[in-house]
Image (cartoon, grey):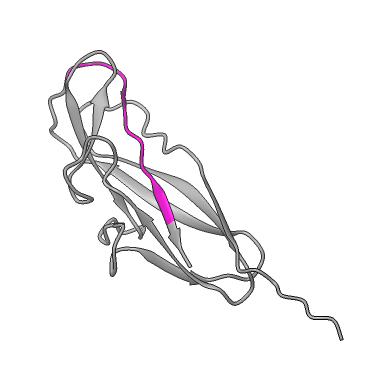
Amino acid sequence: MNAYNVASTCEVSALPLPFGLYSGTLVQATSAITVSCSNGIAYNVGLNQGLYGASTTTRQMKAGGSASLLNYSLFQDAGYSINWDDVAPGWVSGVGTGAPQILTVYGQIPAAQFSTPDGYSDTITVTVNF
């Protein structure tokens, strides 16, 4: 008799979140995270605070040539009301099917920020627990 074990695996990939030009008015954009987990495997996807944010509710992008910061938020829903965190209950949960599953990230830069003109960026770490 032969025995065969199938390992539980999850793979993740993410696309950049292109906010575009910010001119002091509210800006919203979306991106995608693709999660591929073994069939039947429960998983949680969390997003950390980034390089410059103090927490997942106070994320900030930094200007390339200065110390200027621009506040932004990442959400789980199209209503921009459920913060995407890296701990429960703020993470997104799912069950693997063996096929890629796409999770939408909803990003928002609030209005009325008076930042120095420059290119702003941040790096968010995506964590998948399974």
Magenta stretch encompasses residue 112: no
Q: Residue furthest front?
A: 1
Location of the N terminus (image quadrant): bottom right
The stretch of residues the image draws in magenta is 116-127
Residue 89 placed where, x, y %?
Answer: 28, 69
Residue farthest right in this picture? 1
Question: With respect to residue 14, does 69 lie above or below?
Answer: above
Snapshot quadrant of residue 63: top left
Tell me which corner region of the image, top left, top right, bottom left or bottom right, holds residue 113.
top left
Above or below 130: residue 40: below
The count of marks equals 0
Q: Is residue 50 left or right of residue 20?
A: left
x then y, percent, for residue 117: 23, 16
Look at the magenta stretch and give its main secondary structure.
Answer: loop
Tell me the residue at 37%/57% (across/down): 46
- Residue at screen point 22% across, 35% down: 52
Residue 72 left/right relative to 76: left
Which residue appears farthest toward the bottom when viewing the image? Answer: 1
Q: Nearer the viewer, residue 31 or 53?
A: 53
Which residue: 27% across, 62% down?
Answer: 82
Please determine whether, in this image, residue 93 is positioned above or below residue 20. below
Q: Quadrant of residue 11?
A: bottom right
- Estimate the x, y position of residue 106 in percent, counting from the top left: 37, 50
